[in-house]
Image (cartoon, grey):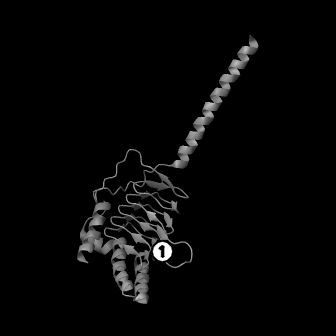
Amino acid sequence: MFQRIKKDIQAVFERDPAVKSVWEVILCYPGFHAVLLHRLAHSLYKKKFFVLARFLSQINRFLTQIEIHPGAKIGEGLFIDHGAGVVIGETAEIGDNVTIYQGVTLGGTGKEKGKRHPTVGNNVVISAGAKVMGSFKVGDNVKIGAGSVVLKEVPPNCTVVGVPGRIVVKDGVSVSQKRGDNIDLEHNKLPDPVLEMLLCLQKQVQDLEARIEEMELKAHGNGKS
């Protein structure tokens, strides 16, 4: 247990340049508090103390504004930055070294029992306001842009942006497999596939205009001759 707590504290130091001391993490970081309380609630949930586990998760929500169902499975080194409005559903599974920003939802679809929330791989960054809805896998080393809505499986080593989420390969970025060294927090530098498509269409229109102008000049030239 203490090893996990140590790794959770270390995750804050690795990913938040504002942190000054261990005591600051212990006393002032709601994301750390939420993960700590969830681990206790999850242990109660596994022992089938369901009501007590849910009650503890509600206390967690009241104190931190972060709602994590006690049934959710969370790996080591989860960092929830700021955290207000984060919701993690019952059958969600989160790997190691994952970073989640405020307003993120790992939600379910449908009313059926069983697995209905996403499984998030290792070294994933989910930016502010993103919604990941459904029972599918988000691969390792994935980055999900702010405000994106992800509704289907995401392969490893790629970026998702937009509504609905579209997969965008990062240009020239090699993803290291060394654990802990490949956490990319530059979630403000994401490509925009809609803008790229509009620029492509604009270029095509300009090319067509140039060809029409060229044809008109030829037509006028032939008419004069």
Q: Is residue 193 above or below residue 211?
A: below
Asked if residue 3 lies left or right of residue 124, the reply is left
Where does residue 78 sit, x and y in percent of width and height?
Answer: 34, 68
**Which residue is depicted at the point 70% across and 22% down?**
216
**Which residue is depicted at the point 49% across and 69% down?**
135
Q: Nearer the viewer, residue 177 or 68?
A: 177
Where does residue 3 sit, x and y in percent of width and height?
Answer: 23, 73
- Residue 23 visible to the viewer: yes
Asked if residue 162 lies left or right of residue 186, the reply is right
- Packing grade of label 1 (10 A; few <14, some 14-19, many >=20) is some
Which quadrant holds the N terminus?
bottom left
Query: Across the whole image, how many numbered discs are drawn on residues?
Result: 1
In the picture as drawn, the residue positioned furthest to the right comes out as 223
Which quadrant holds the C terminus?
top right
Q: Is residue 72 above or below residue 202?
A: below
Residue 70 sits in quarter: bottom left
**Which residue is depicted at the point 36% across and 87% down?**
47
Asked if residue 213 lies left or right of residue 177, the reply is right
Asked if residue 217 lies left or right of residue 10, the reply is right
Q: Nearer the viewer, residue 116 or 59?
A: 116
Residue 158 sits in quarter: bottom left
- Residue 16 visible to the viewer: no
Q: Nearer the viewer, residue 67 or 135?
A: 135
In the picture as drawn, the residue positioned furthest to the top comes out as 225
Where does residue 167 sit, x and y in percent of width and height?
Answer: 48, 53
Residue, disc 1 = 115
- Check disc 1 and give the amino acid type: Lys
Q: Determine the secondary structure under disc 1.
A: loop
